[in-house]
Amino acid sequence: MSRAERISWNLAGIVLFMLAWEAVGRWLGSAVLAAPSLVAREYVQLLREGSMLSELATSLRQMLVGFGLACAIGMPLGILMGRVKLVERVMTPWIGMFVVTSVAALVPLFLLILGTGFAFRATIVFVASVWYIVITSYNGARGVDPGLISVARSFGASPLQTTLKVVFPAVYPYLISGARIGLVHAIRAMVMAEMFVILGYGGLIYQTGMRPETEPLIGLLVTLMAVSVAATWLLRIVGNWISPSYEQRIAGT
């Protein structure tokens, strides 16, 4: 299937979904599920008020701090786990525990320690995303072809040179994929943390959800979905920009 055909099918699916949503929304009413035509009208009002975009911008800035720390720590840690047995043995039990533990269950503890400010929200984002980045980086580093390592060493490459010239290029697609997965969890965690303390964009969603009509709530949720899709798409573009072969290598894994 060509790219144009794939796009056409995607657009057709979106149109069919919107038509079905409009019909169901008109039947159920705004108190249950507002129709997209009504949501669009309310969305214009949300944009005029300005609070939605300002809260979203503030929340995203705080989210990016936690996510940036998750990448800065998670990627090297995952590579170390994949290449150094001792690090793998020490870290594997902890990663297994934190991956299966709901971040929401840890929120009360972090609230007691950090309060409700910036540190709390950035920490929740970090904890929610770092383990997925670690696991993806670890799987990539673990799967590096031993033959490539042997060739580098036979030419007298030092461990640092081997890491930079052989391991990192081989792991690179996994790093970008891990970042994209982690970013989705980071955005979710941002909203969840803010709903607990009723601040930021998550707090705005919580307060809007208390209203009897669903048009503004759906508008906020659609905006959040659009931001998530755009952010992961941007990371994909960055991955292709840094390494043009990124898409081909991902397709081959």
Image (tube, helix red, strand yellow):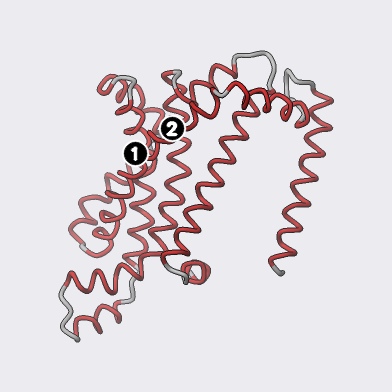
At 36% from the left edge and 61% from the top edge, which residue is drawn? 139
Q: Which residue is mark 1?
A: 66
Q: Earlier in the sequence, mark 2 or mark 1?
A: 1
At 49% from the left edge and 30% from the top edge, which residue is drawn? 56
Q: From mark 2 to mark 1, how far is it between C-alphas?
A: 9 Å
Q: Is residue 209 left or right of residue 182?
A: right
Residue 20 badge: none
Q: Amino acid at mark 1?
A: Gly
Q: Amino acid at mark 2?
A: Met
Q: How busy is the neighbourhood of tag 2: few (under 14 within 10 Å), some, or many (20 plus)? A: many
> Considering depth in this image, is 68 or 174 the residue closer to the camera?
68
Determine whether 202 is above or below 100 in the image: above
The residue tagged with tag 2: helix, strand or loop? helix
Q: How busy is the neighbourhood of tag 1: few (under 14 within 10 Å), some, or many (20 plus)? A: many
The residue tagged with tag 1: helix, strand or loop? helix
Q: Position of residue 39 (x, y in %)?
A: 72, 28
Determine contact: label 2, label 1, CB under 8 Å. Answer: yes
Q: Which residue is mark 2?
A: 190
> Considering depth in this image, is 209 or 216 the residue closer to the camera?
216
